[in-house]
Image (cartoon, rainbow, N blue to C red):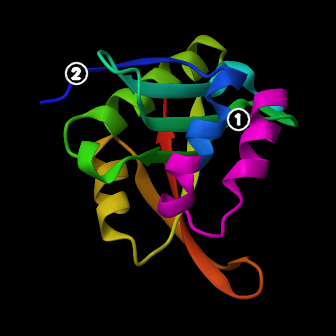
Amino acid sequence: MEHFRVRNYTSADYAALCQLDAPLFEGMGGHVLFRHIEELFPGLFFIAENSETHEIVGFVLGGIHFDDPKTGKLIRIGVKSDCQRIEVGTQLASTLLAEMQRLGVKKVHLTVADSNSAAISFYEKNGFQIKKREDKYFYPDISRLVLEKEL
């Protein structure tokens, strides 16, 4: 099992993070998203890295609703395919949720493709529950499941 640690994102991680994200979320604009999260929610942006090589193996992005500071959003979580199922994603999610709770967040939501059974299983394992299916969530007509977790 590979050893890893979770830490806060720094701008020095940007290029490596974009390379990791591209095959995981093809065409979903990670390179732009990372810069926005870095500016808007720097304290809710975490990296998992190999403890020995310092290679980035995963990340999680979160945010807090500006009009409802008790509601957070898990925006994106990604883990290198060869590092999945060794608790990297679970540790990233736990770190993000703990920081949100420390900031006073009471409920966190996320969206996931209803066809992504592996992600749905992961989120349910981590305490999220499916609340609804939202048609046409992404333009032009891509539906998503909305999951929530109380903190």
Circles 1 and 2: CB atoms closer than 8 Å: no
Q: What's the distance in space between the residues labelled 1 and 2, CA to CA?
A: 27 Å
The location of residue 58, given as percent across then percent down, is 43, 37
| Disc on res. 3 | 2
| Disc on res. 15 | none
Q: How many marks?
A: 2
SS state under label 1: strand
Please name whichever residue, 6 or 51, is drawn nearer the observer in this view of the structure: 51
Binning the other alpha carbons within 10 Å of mark 1 as few (below 14), some (14 to 19) or many (20 upward) gives many
Binning the other alpha carbons within 10 Å of mark 2 as few (below 14), some (14 to 19) or many (20 upward) gives few
Q: Amino acid at mark 1?
A: Gly
| Disc on res. 63 | 1
Residue at 46%, 47% (x, y): give it.
78
| 91 to the left or right of 72 | left
Magenta span covers which residues?
A: 19-39
Residue at 68%, 18% (x, y): give it.
43
**Relative to 139, is 35 above or below?**
above
Question: Which of label 1 and label 2 is nearer to you?
Answer: 2
Please name whichever residue, 125 or 30, is drawn nearer the observer in this view of the structure: 30
